Amino acid sequence: MAKNKKEIPVYMMIFTVSSLLLMGMLLFQVYEAIAPPRIGGALPIEERGNLLAIPAMLEDLDPDPMKAFYELDVQHGQMEFFPGVITDTMGYNGNFLGPVLRVKKGQEVQIQVNNQLELPTTAHWHGLDVDGPNDGGPHQGIMPGESWTANFSVDQPAATIWYHPHFHHTTGNQVYHGLAGLIYIEDEESEDLNIPKTYGENDIPLVIQDRNFKRDGNFHYKLANIGLEPGEVLLVNGTPDPYVELNRELVRLRVLNGSNFENFDLTLSNGNAFYQIASDGGFLEAPVKMDSLFLTPGERAEILVDLSEVTDEHLALLIGKDVVLDIYLSGDPRAAAEIPEALVTVEDIPVGENPTTRTFVLESEGIDGTINGKEFDMDRIDKVVPKGETELWVIRTTERSRPRPGHPFHVHGTQFQIVSRDGNPPPPEEAGFKDTIFVANGEEVVIKVLFHKEGLFMYHCHMLEHEEQGMMGQFMVEDMD
Ligand SMILES: [Cu+2]
């Protein structure tokens, strides 16, 4: 995952060169492995990497403020991630990734998805409280040349959710090639909060993904290689080696771990703390001060970073020693920004007496996996769940899942809350609404789930290759009154 920087200190160069000689044919990999991260100093402008791409905000084609109509074309594309090297990609309304769709609580939304690929796809709204037929899961396949329109009303608090394909056995490949995008749900509270809201200026989306490339420049997506080691290149919003220029002020980063298989642990190069204000399903009750942010595939977090007092010209967002994003600062340092003391009231999901309890045991070996000992079967409904009745779901991973540290468990069609992690109450950053949670090997996480809408939904590991190799099940939500 090391970023290939141009400036290397002399001592490291000597070390590098001698190592390269020793290693002979492993030249390139060795350089990648020992190239030092460039953490402190700023680079002259001409040596900066690539300006961070900011996804377009898609135009709502419905003039009625209580409605929204969006159109997404699923298409092939090409990108020049590296100068002179063409990579075949896929994107929504463009070459790679997709635009941001902004919807408001209470709106009636239609999203028309036009499949211009020669492969089937779906458009799944990850994190959306929606009924089964509009969820965009494996059963809502959109055949080549066809269109599908999702209809739903926005019936949940403000949140940063996302969309991606979910057609069984093509999901991992299509996401890897670029099919993913963000949806911003806004409501009165999100609009009233005193937090940064200027899109692309102080409210910045960061879709972080790791990738491997073949010699011909195309993505190296091969099931056998997935999960053996992280991708060599980190893309942020589709930009390799990205930088962004920000004012010395409070900024809000909306981060999605959009990788297929890798966990990310994010820190700031100056060691400063930041504040998590939202998890998958919306705002937390209060900002949570932290100095690292752990996100598994599919998870989102919104963080506030106060750049007001930073006197350095440059800092970086890091994963370990690797630079994810270079940040160059402008404007004069000033007094620290005010971090809101409180954000929203998170409605507690009510639990009745003697709630139904179900257990889900996640087990993997390499990229193969099962839930409760079973591989996914499109023709088998694993659970029937009553609408409107909170259940307790107990999620466990087995030690057999090593060497992976655990699995991100995702449930469609709802936002749930964590009751306990290994018997302890969740930490404050996990006390809000979630749709994807990390369950470490040997750990037991209890969640309370409540489904408001009927239909067929999925639960699965969000390491996409685990999902496709069997770590998925399906449940039918029925009105039993
Ligand atoms: Cu997994």
Image (tube, rainbow, N blue to C red):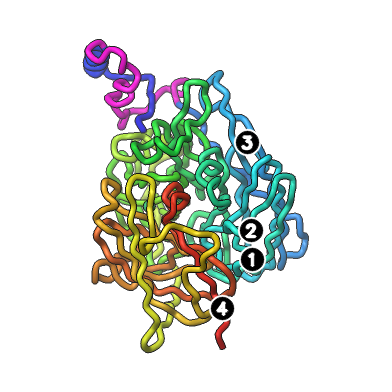
Crowd band around label 3 with a 10 angstrom C-alpha radius: few (<14), some (14–19), many (20+): many
- In the foreground, 31 or 283: 31
Q: Which residue is mark 3?
A: 95
Point 37% across, 50% down: residue? 335
Q: Which residue is mark 1?
A: 133
Q: Secondary structure at mark 3?
A: loop
Q: CA distance from mark 2 to mark 3?
A: 24 Å
Q: Amino acid at mark 4?
A: Glu
Mark 3 or mark 1, which has the lower sequence index? 3
Image quarter where the C terminus lies is: bottom right
- Residues at discs 3 and 1 in contact (Cβ within 8 Å): no
Crowd band around label 2 with a 10 angstrom C-alpha radius: few (<14), some (14–19), many (20+): many
Q: Quadrant of residue 268?
A: top left
User: Which tag is nearer the camera, tag 4 or tag 3?
Assistant: 4
Q: CA distance from mark 4 to mark 1?
A: 13 Å
Would the CB of label 1 be found within 8 Å of ligand 1? no
Q: Which mark is residue 140?
A: 2
Q: Amino acid at mark 2?
A: Gln
- In the foreground, 371 or 79: 371
Q: Amino acid at mark 1?
A: Pro
Q: Quadrant of residue 32?
A: top left
Measured as percent of width and height from the top left, residue 120 is found at 64, 47
Q: Secondary structure at mark 4?
A: strand
Viewer can see residue 329: no
Q: Horizontally, is 337 left or right of 451 in the view?
A: left
- Residues at discs 2 and 1 in contact (Cβ within 8 Å): yes
Mark 2 or mark 3, which has the lower sequence index? 3
Q: Which residues are magenta?
A: 21-48
Mark 4 or mark 1, which has the lower sequence index? 1
Crowd band around label 4 with a 10 angstrom C-alpha radius: few (<14), some (14–19), many (20+): some
Q: Which mark is residue 478?
A: 4
